[in-house]
Image (spheres, rainbow, N blue to C red):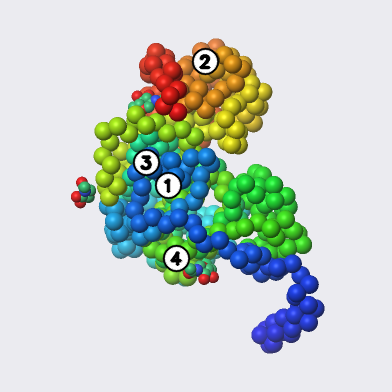
Amino acid sequence: MMLYSFIIVNVIICVGGSSSHPPGHLQPLGLHLPPITDIPVLNKFPSSVEFYEKYVKDGGKPVIFKNVLETVDMPVYYKWTDDYLDKNYGDIMVDMEIGKKEIRKGEMFSRKLSYFLKRYKNMDAYLVEDLPDRMKKDMAIPSSLRCGGFQNVIHTVVMWFSSGGTKSVFHTDDLDNINCLLDGKKDLIMMDRKYAHLVEADGWHKDGSYSDLDVDSVDMYKFPNLKDIPWYQVNLTKGDCLYIPYKWYHHVYSHPGRNFAVNVWFFHRRWFNVTDCHGVDLNVSTAIPFTQFKKPSKLEKFRDDLIMSLDGKEFISQTLFSETLQENDNDLASVADEIFTIIDTDKDGYISISELYSSGNEIFAFELEEDSKTKDGRVDYDQSNMEDDSLKDDLTKTNADVYVNSNNHEEL
Ligand SMILES: *[C@@H]1O[C@H](CO)[C@@H](O)[C@H](O)[C@H]1NC(C)=O
Ligand SMILES: *[C@@H]1O[C@H](CO)[C@@H](O)[C@H](O)[C@H]1NC(C)=O
Ligand SMILES: *[C@@H]1O[C@H](CO)[C@@H](O)[C@H](O)[C@H]1NC(C)=O
């Protein structure tokens, strides 16, 4: 009966003349135009400098690392069977999203990992969790992020685990991302951030950075601006990783079957510190244990907020600077002009990217003075993601240390 009425409905739609509808109307996302499939494919992780110069620089271009997990020492890849996870980490609490088709602000629940492992094959849920401390020892970071400044900006590693069939909303993230598939298959639809004016013209949630469009059935009348946007198709299989630049639009579909990924979030860099890679092991087949990386300091978050506001530009005006601090609820917003003067070392009234990178924790030393006056110890970033320790470490450096490099502009 169901099937019968389905056929009738289909016939009516076809008779109604599907050709008069815009291409892709009421079809899954991506049928408005043929895909672009020529994303570069590498068979190993590039060196840090190559990764920066060819892929990250100038806002970022996606690149596929095909089958790389077979060539690097990534314990999560060969160790994390369900049995191993259950024996070693079964008691760890993890968060699950209810429903495989993502709805933002949907329901979540927490259970032991062992609970999930027993049931996930028949469960309409998606385990999405920041890698808990105890599990970090199995995680290695792609060697491309070992120096040049990348090593200071690794934000979090997140695991994504389900029995497949999950569909994300069409969205962007503010961080750069290397997504590695430990098991299963994922297909991605990606669009360049340069089409922001078209993608975000209709049904866009600025808060959360995602689109209202139904990825299974796009209403091309509600989203007319999609029709001209080229899109990239990326199909990942077990062992592949993919670099997704910050603010690139993407939708991720996971094929049915055990589906398990880890992704590394890092702040987007606009400058590569060449001297920082001198003497660093360039053997790309060694991956680096995650535990060797420090969480990013408050300084990196501060820089990231400003870099996001640059939007391709090379300079930050005083107005943009103070607006950015205000928008991000930064504690320094009230003293924006004073901080601006500190960072603008050549006093030309603009902060260049080089000035942004060569300034350091003297910015927060200023805040400490303010704090002691106001007795307000609040920090302006997510405590759960960044440790106070890293902040303390930074603040124990003297301003003199930080200023040593402030004239090294030729490195930029
Ligand atoms: C990639 O996945 C899409 C969607 O599942 C499929 O239509 C396409 O044929 C796949 N491409 C390749 C090269 O496997
Ligand atoms: C660049 O790297 C070197 C070596 O690690 C470091 O001493 C220097 O402070 C870095 N420069 C900047 C501006 O971060
Ligand atoms: C690179 O590292 C791998 C794994 O540690 C090792 O087997 C290989 O010999 C190294 N290659 C070079 C050129 O040092």
Q: Neighbour class for label 1 at 10 Å: few (<14), some, many (≥20)? A: many
Query: Which residue lies under the disc numbered 1?
Result: 264
Residue drawn at (44%, 62%), measured in percent from left and top?
236
> What number is the disc on residue 46?
none
What amino acid is found at the position of numbered circle 2 in the picture?
Answer: Thr
What amino acid is found at the position of numbered circle 4 in the picture?
Answer: Lys
User: Comparing marks 4 and 2, which lies closer to the viewer?
Assistant: 2
Secondary structure state at the residue bearing disc 4: strand
Give the answer, above or below, for where 304 lies relative to 32: above
Q: From the top left corner, tell me how far across and down residue 6 is, in percent.
A: 69, 82
Query: Which residue lies under the disc numbered 3?
Result: 48
Horizontal side of residue 10 vs 60, given as left or right: right
User: Label 3 CB, ligand 2: below 8 Å?
Assistant: no
Give the answer, above or below, for where 244 lies relative to 187: above
> What number is the disc on residue 345?
2
Residue drawn at (67%, 52%), measured in percent from left and top?
199
User: Comparing marks 4 and 3, which lies closer to the viewer?
Assistant: 3
Q: Are marks 1 and 4 in contact (CB under 8 Å)?
A: no
Give the answer, above or below, for where 234 lies relative to 379: below
**How far, Cα to Cα, is label 1 from label 4?**
18 Å
Of residues 237 and 209, the one drawn nearer to the viewer in this rendering? 237
**How far, Cα to Cα, is label 4 from label 2?**
50 Å
**How far, Cα to Cα, is label 2 from label 3?**
29 Å
Query: Which residue lies under the disc numbered 4?
Result: 185
**How far, Cα to Cα, is label 1 from label 3?**
15 Å
Of the residues under marks 4 and 3, which one precedes in the sequence?
A: 3
Of the residues under marks 2 and 1, which one precedes in the sequence?
A: 1
Of the residues under marks 4 and 2, which one precedes in the sequence?
A: 4
Identify the image quadrant of residue 112: bottom left
Residue drawn at (44%, 18%), measured in percent from left and top?
406
Secondary structure state at the residue bearing disc 2: loop
